[in-house]
Amino acid sequence: MTYPAVVRAILVVNPKATSTTAGGRDVLAHALASQVKLEVVETDYPGHALAVARDAAREGVDLVVAHGGDGTVNEVVNGLLADGPGETSALGVVPGGSANVFARALGLSRDPVEATHQLLRAIEGGHSRSVGLGRADERWFTFNAGLGWDADVVTAVADRRGKQTNALLYVRSAVACYFRPPSGREPLTVHVPGEEPVEVRTAFVSNTDPWSYLGARPVHLNTGTSFETGLGLFALRALNLPTVYRHVRQALRAEAKHRGRRLVRFDDLPELRIEASRPVNFQVDGDPVGRRTRVEFTSVPHALTVLVGG
C-alpha cells in the first residue's frame, strides 16, 4: 500500500521508556525533520500521548510517530482513533521499550537507529500497511489483552516498571502471582458466538502472533491470528502445575501447537465476551487498566494505517 506524502508529523517521545535516551531522541528528531515539518512532544503524565495523538488527528496531521514502549504506542493509537476508525493520521513506530511487541510483529527492528532508517525509507517511498486492531470495551489494543493471571502479572509489574524492566521481572512476577494470586483465582466465563459459555481461570485475547516476547524469544498462543484476521482466544479451564507447564513449554516452541483437555482456543473471532462474578484485573497491550466484571472484545479490520517497509 502506498501512503500519500507526509508533510506534517508529530514525534511523541516517552522519556521514561526502557530504551529511550535524550541522544536517541535528538537523532530521531533531526532525521525526521530533514523530510517533514516536525513537532516533538515529550510525555509528562499517563494519557499525555493519547491527548497529543487525538489532537493531531483532529488537526489533520499526516503522521504521528510513537517513540517508546508498547504502552506509548497504545496511547497514541487510542488517541488517533478517539473519534473512531476512518480518515486519521498515519502511525509510525520507533521502538524504545523493553518488549516492543507491536513493532516487532510489524517487522520493525528493535534497534531504534535501524527502526528510524526504516521509517525514513517508508516516508520517502510512501510505504504503509493497513492493520486490524482489537477493541476491548472503549479501549483499543494492538497485540493483546487479558483477564486473570495474565493481567495480575501486568498489574504487579506496573508499580516497578521503568528503566529496569526486563524479562526476568516478568517471570518472577508470573511465578509470584501464580502461587499467591492477588485476589484469589476468580472463575471467568467466556462467551464465543455460536458456542456454549465456558468457565475458565485465565483468558488471553490476541490480535496478532506472537502474543508477546520473553526477551528475544517469541511466545506463541494463537498462531493463526494476525493483523489481517479476527481475534484469537487462548484460555485455560484450570491452572494446575502440569497444565501450566505443558502450555508454557508449547508456547516457547518455534512450531507451537497447543493441545490439552484444559485448553479453550479459537482463532479469527469477530467478537467475544468475558465475564466474572467479581472484579478481576484487566490489561491491554501490557498495561493495567483497572478491574472489570465484564469486557466485550471486537475485531476491527483495517482500523489504522502504519508506515512500514522501505
Image (cartoon, rainbow, N blue to C red):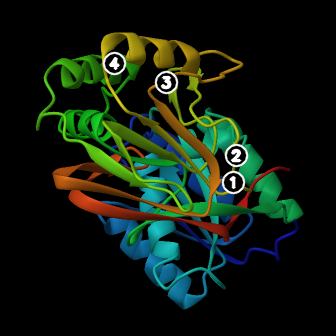
Apparent side of residue 133 relative to residue 70 in the rendered image (left or right): right
Question: Closer to the N terminus: mark 2 or mark 4?
Answer: 2
- Kind of residue at badge 2: Leu
Q: Please tell me in which quadrant of the rendered image residue 245 appears.
A: top left
- Residue 240 placement (x, y as % from top left): 30, 17
Mark linked to residue 261: 3
Q: Residue at x 58, y 46 (%)?
A: 102
- Residue 191 placement (x, y as % from top left): 43, 57
Q: Nearer the viewer, mark 1 or mark 3?
A: 3
Apparent side of residue 48 relative to residue 218 in the rendered image (left or right): left
From the viewer's side, name the closer residue of 244 and 35.
244
Q: Nearer the viewer, mark 2 or mark 4?
A: 4
Q: Residue at x 16, y 29 (%)?
A: 181
- Kind of residue at badge 3: Arg
Q: Residue at x 45, y 69 (%)?
A: 78
- Kind of residue at badge 4: Val
Question: Closer to the N terminus: mark 1 or mark 3?
Answer: 1
Label 4 CA crowd tier, 10 Å (few <14, some 14–19, many 20+): some
Are the two marked residues, 4 and 3, in contact with CB atoms closer than 8 angstroms?
Answer: no
Q: Which residue is mark 1?
A: 227
Q: CA distance from mark 2 to mark 1?
A: 9 Å
From the viewer's side, name the closer residue of 149 and 118.
149
Question: Closer to the N terminus: mark 2 or mark 1?
Answer: 2
The extreme bottom residue here reads: 59
